[in-house]
Amino acid sequence: MREITLHTDSIAATDAVDIEHRLVETEPGSMRRMTLNMGPQHPSTHGVLRIVLELDGETIISAFPDIGFLHTGIEKECEVKTWQQVVTLTDRVDYLANLSNNLVYALAVEKLIGDIEIPPRAQWTRVMMAELQRLNSHLVWLGTHALDIGAMTVFFYCFREREDILRIFEMFSGQRMMTSYIRIGGLALEPPRGWQHVVGKFINAFPSKVDEYEELLDANPIWMRRTQGVGIAPLEDLLDLGVTGPMIRAAGVKWDVRKDEPYSSYDQFDFEIPTRTENDVYARYRVRLSEMRQSARIVKQALEGMPEGPWQANAPKIVLPEREKMKTQMEALIYHFKIVTEGFRVTAGEVYQAVESPRGEIAYYVVSNGTSRPYRVFMRTPSFGNLQALPALLEGRLLADSIAALGSMDFVLGDTDR
Amino acid sequence: MLPDALREHPAAAALDAALPDAIAGGHAERNEPTLFIGAPRIVEVCRFLKAEQQFVRLSSITAVDWIPADPRFEVVYNLHSMDRNARLRLKCWVSESECEIDSVTGVWRSANWYEREVFDLFGIRFRNHPDMRRILMPSDWEGYPLRKDYPVHGYKYTYQNE
């Protein structure tokens, strides 16, 4: 006779996960079935994610992700900041893709404003910074993902290159991580003198570094056996569950916002969208590795063809005036005072702007009611969308593979919880 | 009624032909087609758009609080079609007294978390949702933080001169 047993010992102190989910049918006295609580503090969840796993032996029967531990209410706070102040908040959504977040917010607000034209030099610099950001994010992903699976060396190499990128960010914006470099109306600062030399030195050496990671991992039989054929879920499920980015490109969908809905002059760059069809952890690794090569190509093109000219829009009501003009022109002084004290007003309306972040589609839905503060900023973050597919990836598989599958999703929990 | 600006829009026109009285209005400001849908018809409309018009992806669901307007809440669905390379926005109005709308989890499974998030932060309930619980806030939280009448610093602390 079968009976229903409640497995509550490991989750005694929980409230967020509904206890009725924990009902499991077991044989009386059976030790096969158990509930395993993974996280919120677990190194391979890369943040504060809790997953409640139902196990039958070593097979995962069901997985319940429990999120919200990093919820900071950023969307609420956006509503009390002025338009330009919100840029600093968008940095803090995703610590590995802050420039993508800056960019999507700036693009959305500029679309709302309407009559503002971003000069080519600013657009190209935005593209270059966003691609360096992608490299940065993929490097952290590759290093930590390999570390999870047991290949420790790659981590050190990846972080060596990441350090160079962070130095470039510091050179441009004065900040290593929370750059706030892309602002409404252009950039925060003029690109520093001699940046071409630093970026050039980095980007010329970078492709050979990618070869190095590839060699380290592809010649590693443990890596190959732990990633190939692992973490597969049908493409229809992934699309239905809202997955975007490298995850679906590794399943054969050639969709990238940069190509399909070009923004910030991405249409002037020559690059490809790498795809694979295996749809496993290994394919996701190959896709991201190829993306790193493509990003390096874009950065190189930006470096070689960087247009001259202004780096901010000619919009005195929105962009802060130059210091020299403030001392000589009354209008400039008035605009400066208005922008700093009250902020600028943005035409009423709504905009849904998407860009391709390292993790997938990031889209901001920005609503203005014509005042100097946003009425509503909704952030459609790729990690939130992708994480919903976690049960589809884990259920029916072995517990040991869950670490590889988790890592291959490349989510950032701050991005999920906002 | 289909607005003039969207008569040429293929998906909107097809929707108007198939479900004539579902569209309550719309606009195409800034080249972003938006349709207002009567709240009781939303599941039907979404099912049609997914099955017949290739809107396979639901990008997100969110809400906007337009207090003191009545109905107070606007539920916003952002749809995306890879085949057409097009986006479409649907909007439904939900009043504060009723504060309920049908869930579209039966159409796109990805709606699950987005609807939970809207419930969590705005207090709009989704009928027939498989798992209507809070998702970001603690389960014993009181109030709905993204409502406009909810103070930014919460209810726990009060500050003078505010």
Image (tube, coloured by chain):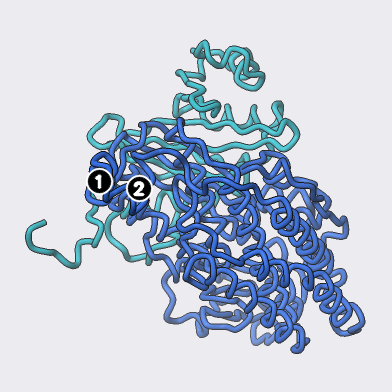
Chain colours: A blue, B cyan
Along the viewing direction, whichever of B78 and A396 lies nearer the viewer: B78
- Location of residue A173 in the rendering, given as x and y in whole percent from the top left corner: 49, 65
Query: Does residue A19 appear in the picture of this structure?
Result: yes
The residue where tag 2 is placed is A321
Drawn side of residue A349 relative to residue A272, left or right: left
Residue B82 location, quadrant: top right
Q: Chain of mark 2?
A: A
Disc 2 is placed on an element classified as loop
- Location of residue A375 in the rendering, given as x and y in whole percent from the top left corner: 33, 42
Mark 1: few, some, or many residues within 10 Å (few <14, many ≥20)? some
Give residue A46's mark: none
Drawn side of residue A158 relative to residue A341, left or right: right
> The residue under label 1 is which amino acid type?
Leu
Residue A219 location, quadrant: bottom right
Marks 1, 2 in one chain = yes
> The residue under label 2 is which amino acid type?
Pro
- Earlier in the chain: of badge 1 and badge 2, it is 2
Residue B76 in the image: above or below residue A357? above
Residue A44 in the image: above or below residue A99? below
Separation (CA) of disc 1 from disc 2: 8 Å
- Location of residue A10 in the rendering, given as x and y in whole percent from the top left corner: 52, 84
Disc 1 is placed on an element classified as helix
Residue A196 location, quadrant: bottom right
Along the viewing direction, whichever of A375 and B89 lies nearer the viewer: A375
The residue located at (55%, 40%) in the rendering is: B104
| Residue located farthest toward the left when viewing the structure as drawn | B161
